[in-house]
Amino acid sequence: MSKPGQPPPVAQFNPVPKIINGGIAGIIGVSVVFPLDLVKTRLQNQTVGPNGEKQYKNMLDCFRKTYAAEGYFGMYRGSAVNIILITPEKAIKLAANDMFRFYLTLPDGSLPVFRQMIAGGSAGACQIVITTPMELLKIQMQDAGRLAAQAKAEGRKFERVTAMQLTRKLVAERGIFGLYKGITATAARDVSFSIVYFPLFATLNDLGPKEPGAAAPPFWWSFGSGCAAGSTAALAVNPFDVVKTRMQTLTKGSGERQYTSILDCITKTLKFEGPTAFFKGGACRMIVIAPLFGIAQTIYYLGLAENYLGIK
């Protein structure tokens, strides 16, 4: 507290506890929802055959076939890459949003929705340096089971590769930028998602009940706000996610199309599959993102670094 006659202390922003909270939140959230994310990837990548045939009929059918073919741990294929890289990804995303909100807040303490959108979009732009290689590697691992099942049905062999083998191959063939294939599509998805998600979450969270003297609503309200905002934003940007997933899938199944650019992907998808293809895996993505951000946002707002680790 400042003494009489002295100016009030200038508010400071310390990113360290925010980064720690974001990292912990990301690990817990992705560990819970990863099987759903795997199903989402496989549904988005499958294409409809000339006679309308599909490898997976729906989300439950994909779960059933994946579990039958690969077992429980098959549902977590590619999770190691995701869990390792989700720590810096979520740390950057959540901490950067708070930082931009801090610096964009007006002198009277208000933060108009437009400025909240700028803060969210800027946070989404910051995270793609981690998100792009993480998604690229994760998608190959997640989709390997689908391609292996397709190859087996056709009497072909399919050789699986590890994330490390794939990383070395990409770097050897294309340099470090080989890990950033699909960065434009990733940016389109993540920036637009953050523009929708963060302002919506903040608005819903502020509507929550607060105990006298409490700065934030109870954890269950933050969880619900994260779920609602996450699922809404996920559905809104699902077309970007479909394009990103297809652009980043390096190994295609027999009869599946290759894409040279985002425009080529959009054009071919519209031509051969119609506009509904852009919402493939949409329900699954909503089910993934809702608990992921509900859990992550709750853990983040519990302030583990400040309240339990003593980092201020």
Image: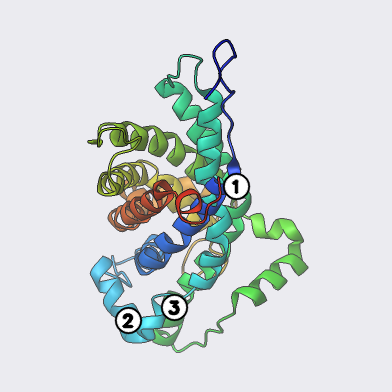
Image point (42%, 20%), residue name: 112
Quadrant where the image shows the C terminus: top right
User: What is the three-letter code of the residue carrying label 1?
Assistant: Val
- Which mark's residue is nearer the viewer, 1 or 3? 1
According to the image, label 1 marks what residue?
Answer: 16
Sequence-wise first label, 3 or 2:
2
Quarter occupied by residue 232? top left
User: What is the three-letter code of the residue carrying label 2?
Assistant: Tyr
Farthest residue in the top direction? 5
Image point (55%, 35%), residue name: 99
Q: CA distance from mark 1 to mark 2?
A: 40 Å
Image point (29%, 74%), residue name: 63
According to the image, label 2 marks what residue?
Answer: 67
According to the image, label 3 marks what residue?
Answer: 145
Image point (54%, 53%), residue name: 20
Q: CA distance from mark 1 to mark 3?
A: 39 Å
- Looking at the image, residue 195 sits to the left or right of residue 168; the answer is left
Sequence-wise first label, 1 or 3:
1
Mark 3 falls on what kind of element?
helix
Badge 1 density bin: few <14, some 14–19, many ≥20, Cα 10 Å: some
Q: Are marks 1 and 3 in contact (CB under 8 Å)?
A: no
- Looking at the image, residue 95 sits to the left or right of residue 116; the answer is right
